[in-house]
Image (cartoon, rainbow, N blue to C red):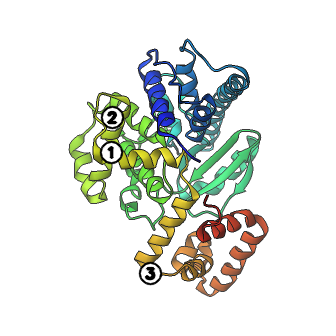
Amino acid sequence: MEIKKATSDYLIQLIKAAIHDVVPEEKPEEVKWENLFSLAVYHKVEEMVFYSISKLVNKPEGEIAHRWNSQHEKNQLIDMIQQEEAKEIIREASAAGIDILPLKGAIMKSMYPKTGFRQMADLDYLVEEFRIDDMIPIMEKLGYVADDVGLEDSHDVYKKLPYMEVEIHRRLLPPTEENHWHTDGIWERLVPDSENVHLLHMTWEDYYLFHLLHFEKHYSMGGSGIRSIIDQYYFMEKYKDCLDWNYINQLLPKMNYVGFENMCRNLAEAWFGNGEMTKDLEGPAEYIINSGAFGTFEQYQKWSFERYKREQGIKTKGGFFFRRMFMERERMEFIYPSLKKHPWLLPFCWFHRLLNAVLFHRGRVKMEMDNFRGKNKK
């Protein structure tokens, strides 16, 4: 997606106007409504942008106005459904005696002035690993279909058409992540809700650190969009003065996140507060703008290749694809836990994974190969 700087600059202006509830400047002549709409959707921030545009004198007209209004109505519906579904999931899990921790966007929504401003693709929850299977009948009772249950190391995925997707996590970070040591002990630090002992909350210090962990993971692997910086801004505005910064500042160096956290805070202030867009922020800002809400596959593939080069000394594309197809047993164990007790099953698991990719994920495999060969580059 080609993104012109004038378009991204005006998008940031409109988001800032929505944050501070002020009338934005009129659209510059060189910015096209079509491009602005596409960029807002690309970053899943069209609700905030729509709110600011509604205050303009010269609003979109014709087909683009219709598309924006239709998207707005759809987003409002999705927000309402997600909130109601969240209540149902928590109620049913609690009734079954399952401790449940809401994650990510479900928590961030409460910090935004309008819940619809914080768009999200799915609902995320953490439950203890020994209760993960107990969520299956609960989700089925609520009308969800198991999409990837038992196939992912960190979470199970459930879907309900047309709009709902739910991820039930068994851990916050997989053991392959370098900072999993902090999240592994999260259950000991959770706080029960005052009205529901099975509904749990992180301390705001741990929530902030998890926000950084989650953001940095996506930022490094494939990119992460403007929404993560908006989250950063809202969180700091609400909680920065009541956080235990001694606790946070002790952990940031251990996580190797001092520089990343500094970039997040400074960029949030530069875009949405009174900060300055310094030279060292220009690179991350451009990277985030080009990443979109969920990053790009090309960037993820580059990250994967660099990781294999660093960890295993693989330097050729052929070696990279061979290792991607025949992953080492330690990584395969996260997909097939039975390998921990029966390592002799590894060749059969390789075959199953390849068969599954050919039968059900052929498009993704082709895209990965084309991207690495450069066929998808303009």
* Amino acid marked by disc 1: Leu
Q: Determine the residue positioned at 56% across, 61% down.
A: 298
Q: Identify residue type, mark 3.
A: Gln
Q: Distance between the residues labelled 3 and 1?
A: 32 Å
From the image, tell me which residue sits under label 1: 281
Q: State which quadrant residue 326 falls in.
A: bottom right
State if disc 1 and disc 2 touch (CB < 8 Å).
Answer: yes
If you read the primary sequence from the N terminus, does the residue marked by circle 2 or circle 1 appear first? 2
Kindly tell me whether residue 195 is visible in this rendering: no
- Where in the figure is residue 225, as x and y percent of width and height? 49, 44
The three-letter code of the residue at mark 2 reads Ala
What residue is rendered at 56% in x and 74% in y? Answer: 333
First-in-chain label (2 vs 3):
2
User: Total marks drawn?
Assistant: 3
| Front residue (pair 51, 35) | 35
Question: Decide: marks 2, 3 in contact (CB < 8 A)?
Answer: no
Give left or right: position of 278 versus 377: left
The percent position of residue 111, horizontal first and vertical second, equals 44, 28
Q: Name the residue under label 3.
A: 312
Q: What element carries label 1?
A: helix
Residue 231, placed above or below residue 376: above
Image quadrant holding the C terminus, namely bottom right
- The nearer-to-camera label among 2 and 3 is 2
Q: In the image, is 257 to the left or to the right of 365?
A: left
Q: Distance between the residues labelled 2 and 1?
A: 9 Å
- Secondary structure under the numbered disc 2 in the rendered image: helix
Between the C-alphas of marks 2 and 3, the distance is: 39 Å
Q: Mark 2 points at which residue?
A: 270
Residue located at (40% from left, 61% from top): 180
- At x 47%, y 81%, the residue is 315
SS class, disc 3: helix
Residue that protrudes farthest toward the right in the picture? 359
